[in-house]
Image (tube, coloured by chain):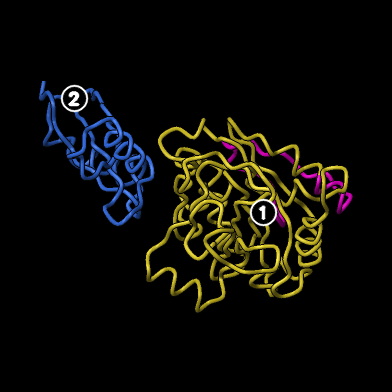
Amino acid sequence: MKIAIVVFPGSNCDRDISWAIKNICGQKPDYLWHKEKNFSNYDLIVLPGGFSYGDYLRCGAIGSHSPIINEIKKRSQKGTKVIGICNGFQILTESKLLPGSLLQNKNLKFICKKVFLKVKNNSTLFSKKYKLNEIINVPVAHMEGRYYCSKETLKELKNNEQIVFQYCSDNGNVNNINNPNGSIMGIAGIINLKGNVLGMMPHPERCSENLLGGENGIKFFRSIFESIN
Amino acid sequence: MKVKIEVMLRNAILDPQGNTIKKSLNDLGFKNVKSVRQGKLIEIELNSSSSNKENKNIEKMCEDVLTNSLTEEYKIKILKNK
């Protein structure tokens, strides 16, 4: 199993996710600088959280034009698994690897707290260790996490079960009060139609050991490792 | 030549910054302010003097990088043609 983490200028969760992966699967991922075009094959490529290019222009916009992204697009078409967390999710939507866009939070605040998520689809490579509708507690830390897409796209996301995680209350109600950023339908994470590219705003790597205050993220990584192996 | 590109969120998209500015202006006594939308302005200087030649390039920059067509719309203004 080979895993790579892409490092952009301004990435700041690259080491956190490397630590979580090594801790859970016992294997240290490689780091790939965003200018790379020629690199060996990886089973999983991770776009980590942070502030690539200082979030200038739009979050993820400049990063989505980094040389490595073209290569990731090609490889994802061939089946390489890709996950984007937080800024990584923003890069995935800007590069059109995932539909929609992430806009400034409705309340104009940088939200840094633990939220409840509902596992809306547990038949993906990234969520199969969770139970369907399982409620998990995962931290978010973002200013631009309001998921937006057209009505047509939303219909497709629903029909194709591409919504993987939704913000919810502690007992699983998806409602406005427990939607931290104003995302459409409380969307926190989606998957592409092919099922190998996932983007999510919450940070599973920040809740993958008890010392950090929770272990609800472990099943996320275990799902991926089981899928790859 | 110099161009200015005005980028605005599409009308259907909620603009919480605009709403906050509107509320603040109303609170400051500017009661006639009905709505505020906030956008951004990008100024670009090009090593070229022909807007005819550059039109396609400017358009491509806007479509590919400077704006997100799902959420934003833009207007291009040619400032100086020399």
Where does the magenta region start and end? A20-44
The type of residue carrying mark 1 is: Val
As drawn, the chain in yellow is A
Label 1 resides on the chain identified as: A
In percent of the image, x 50 and y 79: which residue is there? A159
- In the picture, the disc for residue A115 is 1
Density class for disc 1 (Cα within 10 Å; few <14, some 14-19, many ≥20) is some
The type of residue carrying mark 2 is: Lys
- In the picture, the disc for residue B2 is 2
Q: Residue A42 in magenta?
A: yes
In the image: residue A210, left or right of residue A136 = right
The image quarter containing residue A152 is: bottom left
Tag 2 secondary structure: strand
Q: Looking at this rendering, what residue extends furthest in the top direction? A: B82
Labels 1 and 2 touching (C-beta < 8 A): no
Asked if residue A194 is positioned above or below residue A205 in the image, the reply reads below
Q: Looking at this rendering, what residue extends furthest in the bottom direction? A: A159
What colour has chain B? blue
Q: Nearer the viewer, residue A25 or B34?
A: B34
